[in-house]
Amino acid sequence: MNIDKVLKFFVPKDRSFYPLFEEGINNLVKAAELLKLMLSGNDYDEHEKYHHQIKEIELKGDIITDKAYDQLNKTFITPFDREDIHELVASIDDVIDSINGVSRTICLYKPKRLMPEAEQMAIMVYEAALQLQKMVHYLVDAAANKDEITAACQKVTEIERKADEYYYEAVADLFEKEKDSVELLKNNKIIETLERIIDQEEDVADVVRAILIKMA
């Protein structure tokens, strides 16, 4: 029996990672959707409600991450490089942590009015999350789904570039129109964090790109 057949013999064990990847990315999408809903209004009570739900998702994400790390420690042959598995799991968790962080910031700062740009950036966070969900789902058979994964990665890059431009326009508009310095600082911090979340989503896409290149 040659080495290729031996490796194929172990492949079924490797698939234990994929449900964890799916669970983690689905958790991220839920957090992004709640953030989008949270930023669609200015009601403090609603903000608190959404933050508590996002916090629960963040805690669940920590559990999923721990499970993935435990599985990584127990598995001899992995579906792709161990470092890439670690990076994928960690980068997904980072996005969820940041979504939780910005939702907490909104509840603590209690801005009188959220900028319309904040809502639009939250929509971008959600749109990018849906693309990440696609690419992670397709990783189960990366070779067969190379085009779909590549397209999803490219869409995340497009969203990130759009968010960069939108962020700078929003900051310029904020400094021009907001006369209350405290409210200016609150809103600036919120949109800055939203822009960073989209950067982190592109980091997830970059990890998937690296995996795809190595598996080619």
Image: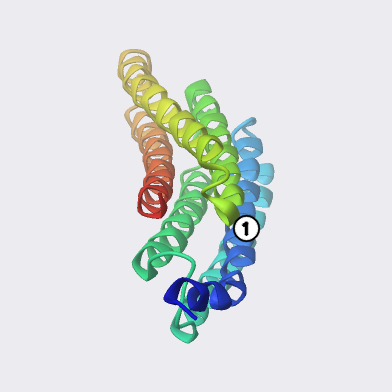
Q: Residue at x 56, y 65 (%)?
A: 61
- 63, above or below 113, in the image: below
Task: Inspect this view and state whether residue 28 appears.
Answer: no
Q: Which residue is mark 1?
A: 22
Dot 1: few (<14), some (14–19), or many (≥20) neighbours within 10 Å? Answer: some
Q: Position of residue 54 (x, y in %)?
A: 61, 54
Q: Position of residue 102 (x, y in %)?
A: 47, 47
Furthest residue to the front?
A: 1
Kind of residue indicated by mark 1: Glu
Q: Secondary structure at mark 1?
A: helix
Q: Position of residue 114 (x, y in %)?
A: 52, 29
User: Dividing the picture into quarters, in which one does residue 21 lie?
Assistant: bottom right
Q: Is residue 60 left or right of residue 172?
A: right
User: Dividing the picture into quarters, in which one does residue 42 lie?
Assistant: top right
Q: Foreground: 201 or 102?
A: 201
Q: Position of residue 187 (x, y in %)?
A: 41, 32
User: Dividing the picture into quarters, in which one does residue 130 lie?
Assistant: top right
